[in-house]
Image (tube, rainbow, N blue to C red):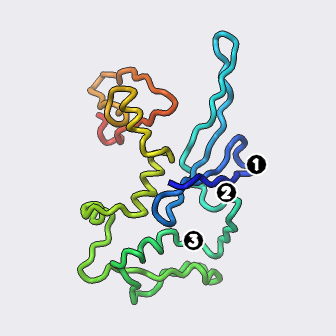
Amino acid sequence: MAAEKKSGYGDHFPGSRKIYKEGAQDGVRVPFREVALSPSQLPDGTTRENGFHRFYDASGPWTDETGTPDVRSGLKPLRELWIESRDDSGTSDAKPVVASVENLPDLSRTRRRARPGANVTQMHYARRGMITPEMEYIAIRENLGRDANHETDYARQNGSAGRPQAERRESGATLPATKLSAGDLLAIPSASVWP
């Protein structure tokens, strides 16, 4: 993967900076917010630097110093080139999607439709063994921009395969205590599996 590009939040989030993790495929650029952590005071009176903690950033172009967002133009169509490059959909004759406000002509978007016989879902691409830019974007985001070998290193060091998972609670039972370090990712099952 390419190097990270950095930009700032100004005074919006003190101690934070906006970074981008570039993907292997063209146009994959995932935003994150890095928050500087305060040093820890140790029992022996010394201090330890803690570095930063990384979060997925959903603030869009508004906190990007390199962009000039304009509410009248809407967001850039990020996926347009990715969709066109697959060549399994085309523009539709249907009426274009237009903003309800008449004085925003730049918000008109042309609708797309799958070509006859084509299936344009991410699930279909995955079953064909294709890794789309959308899939790569989500993978980078879910892994908080870490290198792909992070989970392999975690498993090697801790004698487990994959991420620690919160176990399903039986009625009245509590979750077992688990030691987690700062670099661990924790997958919590959705609320639908809890009794």
Which numbered dot is residue 44? Answer: none
Residue shown at 67% from the left, 65% from the top: 67
Q: Amino acid at mark 3?
A: Lys
Q: Which residue is mark 2?
A: 63
Which quadrant does the C terminus fall into?
top left
Instruction: Specify few, some or many for label 3: CA neighbours under 10 Å numbering under 14, 14-19, or 20 or more.
Output: few
Instruction: Tell me whether circle 2 and circle 3 mark residues in contact (CB < 8 Å).
Output: no
**First along the sequence among labels 2 and 3:** 2
Number of marks in the image?
3
Tell me how far mark 1 sits from mark 3, CA to CA: 25 Å
Image: 179 above or below 5: above
Instruction: Specify few, some or many for label 1: CA neighbours under 10 Å numbering under 14, 14-19, or 20 or more.
Output: few
Q: Which residue is mark 1?
A: 11
Tell me how far mark 2 sits from mark 1, CA to CA: 10 Å
The quadrant where residue 161 appears:
top left
Q: Amino acid at mark 2?
A: Thr
User: Could you say which is closer to the camera, residue 158 or residue 77?
Assistant: 158
User: Could you say which is closer to the camera, residue 11 or residue 183?
Assistant: 183
Secondary structure of the residue carrying tag 2 is helix
Residue furthest out toward the right: 11
Q: Which residue is mark 3?
A: 76
Residue shown at 25% from the left, 64% from the top: 128
Point out residue 55 in the picture as x, y percentages from the top left corner: 55, 44
Left-right relation of 171 to 32: left
The quadrant where residue 136 appears:
bottom left
**First along the sequence among labels 2 and 1:** 1
Point out residue 42 in the picture as x, y percentages from the top left corner: 64, 15
**First along the sequence among labels 1 and 3:** 1
Tell me how far mark 2 sits from mark 3, CA to CA: 15 Å
Secondary structure of the residue carrying tag 1 is loop
